[in-house]
C-alpha cells in the first residue's frame, strides 16, 4: 500500500466515537449554521491563543480575504508578502483588488527574508503579510518596527502554523489579525473546509463578523458595504471543538515524527529542516532539500512512498500571475529552493512503521544516486 503524504483514516478510526458524537450533537441541536457550536469554537480558539476575538469562516483563503478587507486593504493598495507560499495567500490579495509585492526568502528556513521588506515599502503599501510557512514562525519583530514606522498593518498567514510559537508567543497573536485554515490536511483540520481569523482589535472583529455574513449587521440589512457569504458550518465547528481538546497531543506527535525523520536521515546528504532560534516548529510539513530532487522523486516511485513538493512553482513564476511583472531570476533564493525542496509524509497519526518505510526508501534512493 502506498504511504501517502497525508491521511486522516487512522485518526478517524482512533477518534471515531468522538467525531460521530459531535456530528450527532449538531444534527440533533436544531441549528446547522451560525449556532452554539460556532460560537463555542470561536471562544475556545480565541482562548487557546489568549486573544480577544476569533471569527470563523468557510476556508483559509476567505479568512485572508475577509481579514484584508477588515483591515481596510483594497484596490490600489500594496501588500508585501512572499512568493514561496501556497498560492491562496496571493490569490486573497488579488481578490481584494490589492497588489502583492514579493520579497525573497531565507535559504535556511524558507521563510520571508524580513531584511528585504523595508526597501519595498512605498506610498501605496498598506499591509505586511508574513506566512508562517511549513509550521514555524517568521520573526515579526522587524516587521512590527517597519509597520509602526509607516502606519501599516500586519496580517499573519497562519494556515500552516496552528500552535506554533516564537519566543513562547503563539503564532497569530502579534499581527493586527491572523488567518487560519482548517482544511483537513492542516495542523488543526476539520472534516471538510473551514477557516478563522483571530484579532485583539474590536473594530477589526466587528468588520469580520459583518463581512462574513453578507455585510449585514442586522438581519437582512446591509448597512455599510456588501460582504461575502463565508460561514463555518456547525458540524465542522463541533468537530473542531473535539479536535482542539486533543490538539497538544497532535503537536507532540508531529514533533516526534519529525525527530525520527531527523534521526533516520541526519547522516545523509539531505538538508533537513532548520529551526530558527526561539521557534517551536509544528511541522505542518517536513521539508528537506537536495540538488537532485527530481531524480530522487522519480526513483522513489518504485517504493510506494508518496512525496510532495510545496511548492514547485513559486507564485511569481505562474502564468496566472504574469500581470505582476516578475521576471525569472527576480527572486533567486525562492526560485533555487523551489527546484530542490520536497516534503515527506507528515501527519500526527503516521505510524512508526510507515515512518521507517519512508526513511528506508529515501536512504536506498540516495545511495543509488
Ligand atoms: C492552505 C493555505 C491557505 C488556504 O487555505 P484554504 O482553507 O485551503 O482556503 C492559505 N495560505 C496558506 C499558507 C495555506 O497553506
Image: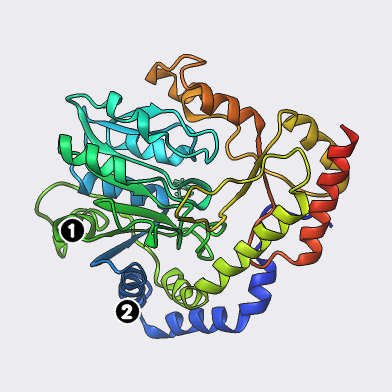
Q: Is residue 340 above or below residue 356?
A: above
Residue 241 position by quadrant: bottom left
Near-viewer residue (51 or 119): 119
Disc 1: which residue: 201
Q: Is residue 56 above or below residue 334?
A: below
Is residue 36 found left or right of 83 in the rendered image?
left
- Where residue 318 appears, as percent x and y from the top left, is 51, 25
Give how far across and how far down residue 85 sits, in percent. Answer: 48, 38
- Residue 3 at x, y percent in the picture: 77, 55
Asked whether the residues under the numbered discs 2 and 1 touch, taking CB atoms below 8 Å apart as contact, a structural biologist would say: no
Q: State the mark number for residue 244.
A: none
Label located before the other in sequence (2 or 1): 2
Eyeballing the image, is 77 above or below 272?
above
The image quadrant of residue 206 is: bottom left
Foreground residue among 324 and 153: 153
* 359 to 76, vertically: above or below: below
| Dot 2: element | helix
Q: CA distance from mark 2 to mark 1?
A: 23 Å
Crowding at mark 1 (Cα within 10 Å: few <14, some 14-19, many 20+):
some
What residue is disc 2 on? 36
* Residue drawn 68% across the image and 76% down it: 13
Amino acid at each position: 500500500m502506498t504511504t501517502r503524504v497525508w491521511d486522516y483514516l487512522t485518526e478517524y478510526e482512533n477518534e471515531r466515537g468522538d467525531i460521530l458524537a459531535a456530528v450527532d450533537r449538531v444534527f440533533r441541536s436544531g441549528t446547522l449554521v451560525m449556532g452554539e457550536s460556532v460560537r463555542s469554537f470561536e471562544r475556545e480558539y480565541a482562548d487557546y491563543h489568549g486573544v480577544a476575538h476569533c471569527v470563523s469562516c468557510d476556508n483559509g483563503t476567505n479568512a485572508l480575504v475577509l481579514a484584508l478587507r477588515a483591515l481596510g486593504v483594497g484596490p490600489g493598495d500594496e501588500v508585501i508578502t512572499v512568493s514561496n507560499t501556497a498560492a491562496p495567500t496571493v490569490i486573497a490579495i488579488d481578490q481584494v483588488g490589492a497588489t502583492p509585492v514579493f520579497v525573497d526568502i531565507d535559504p535556511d528556513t524558507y521563510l520571508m527574508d524580513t531584511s528585504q521588506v523595508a526597501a519595498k515599502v512605498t506610498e501605496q503599501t498598506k499591509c505586511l503579510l508574513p506566512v508562517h510557512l511549513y509550521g514555524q514562525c517568521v520573526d515579526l519583530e522587524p516587521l512590527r518596527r517597519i509597520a509602526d514606522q509607516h502606519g501599516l498593518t500586519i496580517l499573519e498567514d497562519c494556515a500552516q502554523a496552528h500552535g506554533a510559537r516564537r519566543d513562547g508567543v503563539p503564532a497569530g497573536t502579534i499581527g493586527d489579525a491572523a488567518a487560519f485554515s482548517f482544511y483537513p490536511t492542516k495542523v488543526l483540520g476539520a472534516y471538510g473546509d473551514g477557516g478563522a481569523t483571530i484579532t485583539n482589535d474590536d473594530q477589526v472583529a466587528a468588520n469580520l463578523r459583518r463581512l462574513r455574513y453578507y455585510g449585514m449587521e442586522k438581519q437582512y440589512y446591509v448597512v455599510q458595504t456588501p460582504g461575502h457569504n463565508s460561514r463555518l458550518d456547525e458540524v465542522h465547528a463541533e468537530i473542531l471543538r473535539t479536535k482542539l481538546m486533543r490538539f497538544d497531543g497532535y503537536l507532540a506527535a508531529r514533533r516526534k515524527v519529525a525527530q525520527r525523520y531527523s534521526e533516520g536521515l541526519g547522516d545523509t546528504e539531505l538538508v533537513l529542516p532548520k529551526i530558527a532560534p526561539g521557534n517551536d516548529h509544528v511541522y505542518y510539513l517536513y521539508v528537506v532539500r537536495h540538488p537532485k530532487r527530481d531524480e530522487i522523486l522519480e526513483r522513489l516511485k518504485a517504493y510506494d512512498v508518496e512525496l510532495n513538493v510545496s511548492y514547485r512553482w513559486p507564485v511569481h513564476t505562474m502564468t496566472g500571475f504574469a500581470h505582476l511583472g516578475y521576471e525569472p531570476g527576480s527572486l533567486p533564493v525562492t526560485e533555487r529552493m523551489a527546484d530542490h525542496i520536497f516534503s515527506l509524509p507528515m501527519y500526527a497519526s503516521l505510524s512508526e512503521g510507515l515512518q521507517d518505510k519512508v526513511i528506508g526508501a529515501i536512504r536506498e534512493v540516495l545511495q543509488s544516486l
